[in-house]
Image (cartoon, helix red, strand yellow):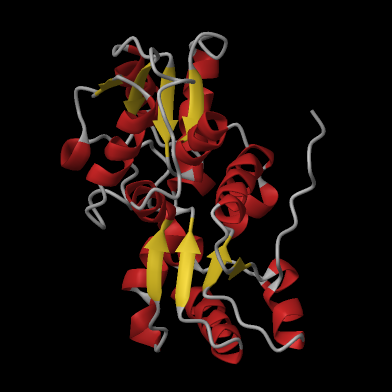
Amino acid sequence: METRKLEIPVIADLFARGEKPEYLYWVGCAGAFDDRYRKVAQAFAKILTFVGENFAVLGKEETCTGDPARRAGNEMLYQMQALQNIELFKGYEIRKILTICPHCYNIFKNEYPDLGGNYEVINYLEYLDNAINEGKLNVDLSVFGEERVTYHDPCYLGRSNDIYHEPRKILRHMTKNVVEMERNKSFALCCGAGGGQYFKEAEKGEKEIYMERTEEALRTDSSIIATACPFCMTMLTDGLKYKNKEEEVRNLDVAEMIVQSLGL
């Protein structure tokens, strides 16, 4: 079957034609530069295109939110990046932002307002859950129905923003076997990358956090570890490789699973 090229609208092009999208799709650094997470960014774009959503990306105008700088303690760099983004959003009259990265979601929603950046910020899991409930996405059990799936809660979705139920509801539309790790929801263990840890060398200790979490996931005997964060995906994928389990257990983003279920 011939694969159709995915055409993603760029907000500057729409504005040049006198048009304005309802949603800005914020791709994020990982979605733009990380080879693995680009597939997730493309998967969500396919879904938005499939349902006929009125969205656009910033393209080359998109920069970092400043979240890594703030987590690492560089407040001045964070505010410079944030204020630059706020001015850009103002120019394009952006009101609604869709995000695939929990770190981008959290900082847009909870920290940009302190600098005057007030938006309706929607995480893609919230969007996908609503789309399924409204009948826009008719996912079923035909692809993953018998597979055992466990879901890892990203800290910036769960504990920071109370998004626990949406991913589990979505997964139950696609498989009969959603199983929980020993530590889940508000008690879930971090993947080990949060708080700027992703960008620094490991500290002294007996075991890496990502290995501890990977072992918890493997104890569920799941064939798929579902994730919803680029940092979590990287850490758990590394854990699976370290355990020589990457051929037996897949680490898939929730959006990728929906795309496979729909055959997009």
Residue at 33% over, 24% down? 150
Residue 10: horizontal and vertical position, in percent? 71, 70
Residue at 65% over, 45% down? 38
From the viewer's perspective, is residue 204 above or below residue 186? above
Q: Quadrant of the N terminus?
A: top right
Total count of labels: 0
From the viewer's perspective, is residue 168 above or below residue 250? below
In the picture provided, is 34 more to the left or to the right than 53? right
Q: Is residue 206 visible?
A: no
Residue 237: horizontal and vertical position, in percent? 52, 26
- Is 25 or 1 nearer to us in this picture? 1
Residue at 52% over, 68% down? 65
Residue at 50% over, 41% down? 255
In the picture provided, is 226 more to the left or to the right than 36? left
- Is 77 or 181 nearer to us in this picture? 181
From the viewer's perspective, is residue 30 above or below residue 26? above
Q: Is residue 65 visible?
A: yes
Q: Quadrant of the C terminus?
A: top right
Q: Quadrant of residue 223?
A: top left
Residue 49: horizontal and vertical position, in percent? 61, 55
From the viewer's perspective, is residue 129 above or below residue 220? below
Q: Quadrant of residue 4?
A: top right
Residue 152: horizontal and vertical position, in percent? 34, 33
In the picture provided, is 50 more to the left or to the right than 97? right
